[in-house]
């Protein structure tokens, strides 16, 4: 069994690749919920939705988020009414938020709600939130703290990030399935998806006790670089790295993950960095890691799984 | 100044006719909120929306409710997710419910929210809720009480109604504008729209103190019959009359309103009932009261306003 740690779009793509290669009992995808927020009375889980929509095959491949064939009448009407329109909510996507909120209000956990939504969308693989407790990623620019969506959507990632916190993390427990997976004897490896290390993967790892659990494991941990040829495929990862004085390339990512990972999948355009990686005790593999379609996703997932297998064979 | 008491579709039509003939300072439309309910976390005010959409000219003329040019992607997605779909919510209509709920949650009164929404939709005439307090119409069929929307939408008005109550009415106050209008020296008459007497008009009249205020007024009160030629134009009014052992025609309505109204506008197809009305001390006027378009609405509104003027002249 493989545990994947995933954030939004990049995480969803690799998770989908893994789901093409592994059966539903062979994969658990634990998803960041630090981006979750309440908006217009609705509980919105952007990363869970990205992964769920992608595995259900209903994701919008052009925008990278939301549903395919989406319509925007709600937003148009909201604009006419002078309501808040900074966060885009498609007509079909709204149903996910309304139904999630309805089930949460009825007392279900986020894990249970996610399982229900996945079942309804025909997703057989297990997509689980990192935690059933509320955790809110907040970022500081100079003297102001911003909620993550304020920073990410309303401010378009423009402020320089000085500090990141996960509000409520001290009370968060790993979701039951994430905990059970980490404690399972079936677990063969962990794959860290090409998601933003600071706001997608770190919130998961920051759950009290989780890092200690992972450190005790004897299974390989492999990350896929979200930075390709010195560029982030999507989102503010590279900009954040610069603001945090990390080397703004795949090496910066590897260094950030140094004490955590055993293997690292990089894009072949970064092969000139190979020699620099020799200073790390991290096994590296170069591959074409751009994921434009399902075949690409399978290819990158295959490279990550092969690296896990190779690392297991060496032990 | 004229005060109109209105429920849903029929009320909206006459209210729009009155708004064509009277200026924004000459008309206050007080709307039933006994049908209001919370659904999927949203505060839904069906009658306020019907009147507001109609006066804004954005109402769906085919269905009689909701917005023109509506799309249904939210409902489709909700169906796919296995969520509740018994109450139809259009994509654009949803924005009204979400924005109303957001403003109510922020602490605004329903009156203030309605004024904001009307302003945004370009409605200059004053549409006000009967009350800013929650009142819920409930109906009893044999030994079970149903919420109004359960009876009206989910059960399609099929159960025989034995009893009607307005839950919370004992704590309800008239909305500030309704109260101010009833206390205004400018008030020249009250028009009861062709709405369901039992579940659209009665909730308004049942607000503690309201009936006493109306009884003290010296202005004519005129009703337009919701029953035409022994048929309800829309909704369960006639069926309810039968179940309540009222004569199932315009006379039954007039008798129900007997101690309240001074004038009654009936459809010309009911002119054969003229002699029977002689036993009431109610001035009756016969007109073509079918309202298919704005011209029809103006014609019926004109008949009601003329009856108010005639009754004032006689005093």
Image (cartoon, coloured by chain):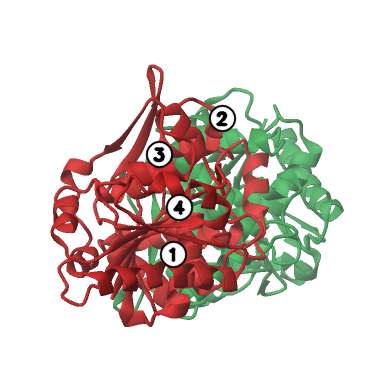
Chain colours: A green, B red
Q: Which residue is mark 4?
A: B225
Q: What is the x, y in percent for residue B168?
A: 23, 40
Of circles 3 and 2, the one toward us is: 3
Tell which subunit mark 1 falls on: A
First of labels 3, 2 by sequence position:
3
> How many angstroms separate mark 4 from mark 1 (CA)?
57 Å
Q: What is the x, y in percent for residue A255?
A: 55, 62
Q: Which residue is mark 2?
A: A181
Q: Which residue is mark 1?
A: A148
> How many angstroms separate mark 4 from mark 3 (CA)?
43 Å
Q: In which quadrant of the rendered view does residue B240 lie?
A: top left
Q: Which residue is mark 3?
A: A105
For the residues labelled 3 and 1, say whether their Cβ atoms are less than 8 Å apart.
no
Q: Which residue is outermost to the right?
A: A295
Q: Which residue is outermost to the top?
A: B143
Tell which subunit mark 3 falls on: A
> How many angstroms separate mark 2 from mark 4 (CA)?
68 Å
């Amino acid at each position: 069994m493989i545990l994947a740690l995933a954030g939004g779009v990049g995480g969803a793509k690799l998770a989908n690749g893994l789901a093409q290669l592994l059966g539903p009992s062979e994969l658990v995808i634990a998803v960041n919920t630090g981006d979750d927020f309440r908006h217009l009375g609705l509980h919105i889980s952007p990363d869970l939705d990205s992964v769920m929509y992608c595995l259900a095959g209903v994701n919008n491949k052009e925008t990278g988020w939301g549903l395919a064939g989406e319509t925007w009448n709600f937003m148009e009407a909201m604009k006419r009414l002078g309501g808040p329109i900074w966060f885009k909510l498609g007509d079909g996507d709204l149903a996910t938020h309304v139904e999630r909120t309805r089930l949460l209000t009825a007392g279900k956990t986020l894990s249970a709600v996610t399982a229900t939504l996945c079942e309804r969308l025909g997703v057989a693989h297990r997509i689980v939130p990192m935690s059933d407790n509320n955790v809110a990623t907040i970022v500081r620019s100079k003297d102001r703290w911003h909620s993550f969506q304020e920073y990410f959507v309303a401010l378009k990632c423009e402020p320089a990030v000085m500090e990141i916190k996960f509000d409520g993390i001290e009370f968060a427990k790993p979701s039951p399935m994430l905990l059970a997976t980490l404690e399972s004897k079936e677990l063969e490896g962990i794959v860290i998806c090409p998601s933003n290390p600071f706001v997608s993967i770190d919130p998961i790892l920051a759950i009290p006790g989780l890092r200690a659990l992972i450190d005790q494991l004897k299974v390989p941990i492999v990350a896929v670089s979200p930075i390709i040829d010195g560029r982030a495929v999507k989102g503010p990862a590279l900009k954040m790295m610069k603001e945090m004085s990390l080397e703004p390339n795949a090496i910066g990512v590897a260094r950030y993950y140094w004490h955590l990972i055993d293997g690292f999948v990089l894009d072949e355009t970064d092969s000139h960095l190979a020699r620099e990686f020799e200073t790390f005790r991290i096994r590296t593999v170069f591959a074409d890691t751009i994921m434009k379609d399902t075949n690409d996703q399978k290819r990158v997932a295959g490279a990550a799984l092969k690296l896990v297998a190779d690392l297991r064979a060496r032990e």
